[in-house]
Amino acid sequence: MPRVEQSRAMLCGMSGVAFIPTLLVSWSSAAFIISYVIAVLAGHVEPLVPYISDTGTKPPESGVFGFMINISALLAVITMCIRYLLIEKQNESSHFIRSSCNILSLCIGLVGCVGMGIVATFQELSVPSVHDIGALVAFGSGVIYITLQSIISYKSCPKWNSYFMCHIRMAISVVSCIAFIPMIVFASQISMTKIDWTPGEKDYTYHFLSAICEWTVAFGFIFFFLTFISDFQMMPRKFLEFGHMYTHADVGQRFSQCELKLSAHTHTCWES
């Protein structure tokens, strides 16, 4: 019975379309970690902070990296489109931003997803110039997207978001922006294209610092999308049919009702 109750609790927590950003975060994290582990075990990269792309350059990890990052890009497109629709629906009653701002944010986010696809498709050592352009587009557009989304979140307070959540998003955006700039600066100082870096060789310090910033920005994106889960709980899975949105307070009320029902059911089960 405890397993059944845990499943019910998970379903209560995954109301609306919250499973979509959850899947995006889980899949993207797995893509980075799995390709890293394979590359290190195969001896293709050093364990100490390689570039993310370095962990997906040589087979067999290149196939895993390319496949999983392309799926991540697709999930990101779906997440951003739903986020756009969510804001449009909220804005119908609250009018907290211009619709053009929402469209601009979506377009920038989609450009970043195209950059992810380029990074996944064109390997670092095969077509380095195209790969680097894709990475620059992905990271640059991503940083702008999460910054715009943080501003939009503040605009929607307190009806559609809590200030605590807005502070978290803005903090992630600021850290990502700060890490993005030295990532580009240090990477531009590297005079060679290679993946098997060792401490002490030429340009290693630039590579090391740039790689740390790259991982910081990448997981900044992941943690930012993680914060979308609470927002996506406001949107029923058939929102286009029902045309109804839940406010931030409604979601809390729904959780309370769900917990009460779950507690009552658990008590009944144990009595029987």
Image: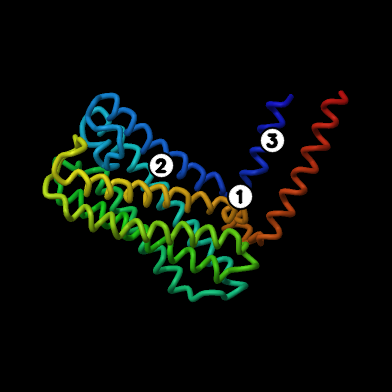
Residue 28: mark: 2
Callout 3 environment at 10 Å: few (<14), some (14 to 19), or many (20+)? some
At 30% from the left and 49% from the top, the residue drawn is: 116
How far apart, in angstroms, are the residues tagged by discs 2 and 3?
26 Å
Residue 270 horizontal side relative to residue 233, left or right: right
Task: Name which quarter of the figure residue 33 lies in.
Answer: top left
N-terminal label among 3 and 1: 3
| Residue projecting furthest to the right | 271
> Is residue 234 rendered to the left or right of residue 53?
right
Q: Earlier in the sequence, mark 2 or mark 3?
A: 3
**Percent coordinates x, y for residue 119 in the rendering:** 25, 47
Q: Residue at x 63, y 61 (%)?
A: 245
Q: Amino acid at mark 1?
A: Gly
The residue depicted at 79 percent of the width and 41 percent of the height is: 261
Query: Which one is nearer the viewer's eye here, 197 or 86?
Result: 197
Query: Disc 3 and disc 1: Cα gap in Å?
Result: 15 Å
Q: What whole-number distance in Å separates the C-alpha atoms at marks 1 and 2?
A: 21 Å
Tell me if 96 is positioned left or right of 125 in this view.
Answer: right
**Mark found first going from the N terminus, 1 or 2:** 1
Is residue 229 depicted above or below 173 in this figure?
above
Helix, strand or loop for disc 2: helix
Q: Which residue is mark 3?
A: 8
| Three-letter code for the amino acid on which mark 3 is drawn | Arg
Would you call the spot at circle 2 few (<14 residues within 10 Å), some (14-19), or many (20 or more)? many
Of the 4 image quadrants, the one containing the N terminus is top right
Are the two marked residues, 2 and 3, in contact with CB atoms closer than 8 angstroms?
Answer: no
Location of mark 1 (residue): 16
